[in-house]
Amino acid sequence: RWREEQQLYSSDLPMEQCHMKAARGGKGAKGCAFNSMSSESIYAVHPGGLTACLDSSAPFYFVVKLGDPKKLLFTLDGAGACWNKGSFDREAYGCVKKPSPGPWSGMLDVTDKRNPYYGYTVVRVVDCSGDLFAGNAASAWGKNGTLVQQRGYQNTKAALEWSLLQFPQLSNLAVLGHSTGALGVQYWADRILTTFADRNASAVVHSDSFIGWVEPQEGLQATQAYINNDVWNVCKNLALSAKQQKACVAGEFTFQSHFADTMKLHKEALFTMVSSKADSAQIALNSFFNPK
């Protein structure tokens, strides 16, 4: 019943804009700091720098909703994926090109006392790069062959670095990714947990509604090797260790195997995975790679 009630819920708080580049110097230098924010607003934080969306006219931002300064819900929104011009142009695969936060429902409704994350501060990484939050590349998929940016790695890194500065102490850390964001969590969970390890937080990781399983498995590994190396440039990102980068370049790395290793490495954290047999997005992805 709670889930049904939340489906249409969206926050009615105003969204204020904060530009970190402008806030770092001179007037308004504290404008993007957590302690300068109000619980009466939601904040779109624009980090600038190397961050980008597929649509160059729409700068990337992540969203902050103020709550308990010692309880953090770090979440990756899902918004499709694209790995060639066909998937970039085809709406069926999502590939959202501008920032567009979804509803504040389910675990994201931190105002509902029935939610185990009631009262948490939310840092919401909005997906507009079509690369499972892991890419760091540019491809000639735009009009007349213009380059489009896939900077999911830089976008997530910017939100993570901001969070690290704002939360010197944590009692609770929850990492959530839904839909394609669930795959992003599989990629980022190790780095996020390691980054906050000195905060002594009780940690839980949720990968919600995208396992990323493709049969046969040989096809999954070969496909990910191609996309990771030749399309999204995933393998050289610092979210991976030197050993993982080497395996990635060699085509021996998948998000799923990396997530399994993360669970073994971070035994102190609780990991959950949720999926559905009738998930249309996962069925479409599997059918794409296995047309028969």
Image (cartoon, rainbow, N blue to C red):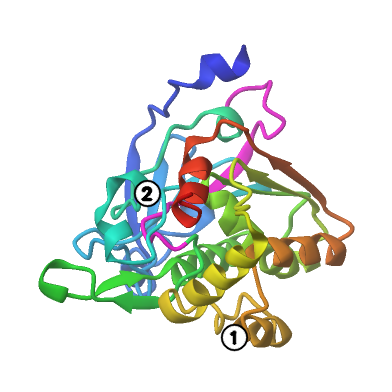
Considering depth in this image, is 90 or 100 the residue closer to the camera?
Answer: 90
For residue 93, above or below residue 105: below
For residue 71, above or below residue 51: above
Amino acid type, residue under disc 2 in the picture: Tyr
Q: Give the range drawn in magenta.
A: 111-131
Can you tell which quarter of the image residue 100 is in? Answer: top left
| Residue annotated with mark 1 | 249
| Residue annotated with mark 2 | 93
Q: Which residue lies furthest to the top in this view?
A: 1
Mark drawn on residue 233: none
- Helix, strand or loop under label 2: helix
Provide residue 9's location: percent of width, then percent of height. 45, 22
For residue 217, above or below residue 240: above
Q: Residue furthest front?
A: 292
| In this rendering, position of residue 244 left or right of residue 249 | right
Is 117 one of the magenta-colored residues?
yes
Mark nearer the N terminus (1 vs 2): 2
* Residue 53 visible within the image: yes
Provide residue 209's location: percent of width, then percent of height. 60, 40
Residue at 80 percent across and 55 percent down: it is 201
